[in-house]
Amino acid sequence: MLLKGKAWIFGDDISTDLIAPGRLFHLRSNLPELARHVLEDARPEFASSVKKGDFVIGGNNFGLGSSREHAPAILKIAGVSAVLAKSFARIFFRNAINVGLPVIICDTDNIKEGDILEVDLESGKVVNLASGSEIVFSPLPPAMRKILQDGGLVEHIKKHGDIEV
């Protein structure tokens, strides 16, 4: 799976409340509408400006806070192709895989706002097309890549009836 898009830089400790604002709780049954507000408390222009294929770049502890599974879902609906961060809250990481949003643990220090990245999920490589630099990361296990390829855990189970580990 090869992904390509623009980098949007966020910092450390981006919470699920910043991703999916709690004040919009009433929209949780309308995820496309909630996606129109994704990350607006962290960057008001993000939801209206993000393009399909773009990347969210975090620092440490991305996705901390409540276990809102709609946080990674609305990132995906908004067009984000993957989230790259130094570390993730465990429940966010798992929820992201379950909804079909790739999450990559890697060093994000040298990625700049607007850089165009190419991410190869299978080989574990991020190529920064703006700078020519490469970041190597540990690829997700094959079972997780298969879930992502199928569009998330529900679609994977519909297609295969079970999970092979």
Image (cartoon, rainbow, N blue to C red):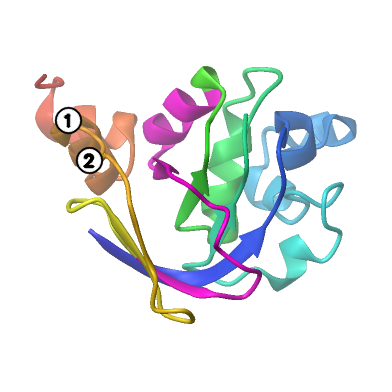
Residue bearing mark 2: 145
Give the residue type at disc 1. Ala
Of residue 151 and residue 132, the one placed in the foreground of this image is 132
Give the residue type at disc 2. Arg
Is 105 in the magenta?
A: yes
Is 102 in the magenta?
A: yes
Residue bearing mark 1: 143
- Rendered residue at 63%/36% (across/down): 71
- Rendered residue at 39%/78% (across/down): 132
- Rendered residue at 53%/66% (across/down): 54
Q: Position of residue 62 (x, y in %)?
A: 62, 34
Q: Which residue is outermost to the bottom?
A: 130
Label 1: which secondary element? helix
Q: Position of residue 83 (x, y in %)?
A: 51, 48
Answer above or below: position of 155 versus 119: above
Query: How many residues crowd mark 2 within 10 Å: few (<14), some (14–19), many (20+)?
Result: some
- Image: magenta residue range: 92-118
In-image side of 146 versus 40 (left or right): left
Q: Which picture quadrant has residue 109?
A: bottom right
Answer above or below: position of 86 versus 149: above
Which quadrant of the rendered structure holds the C terminus? top left
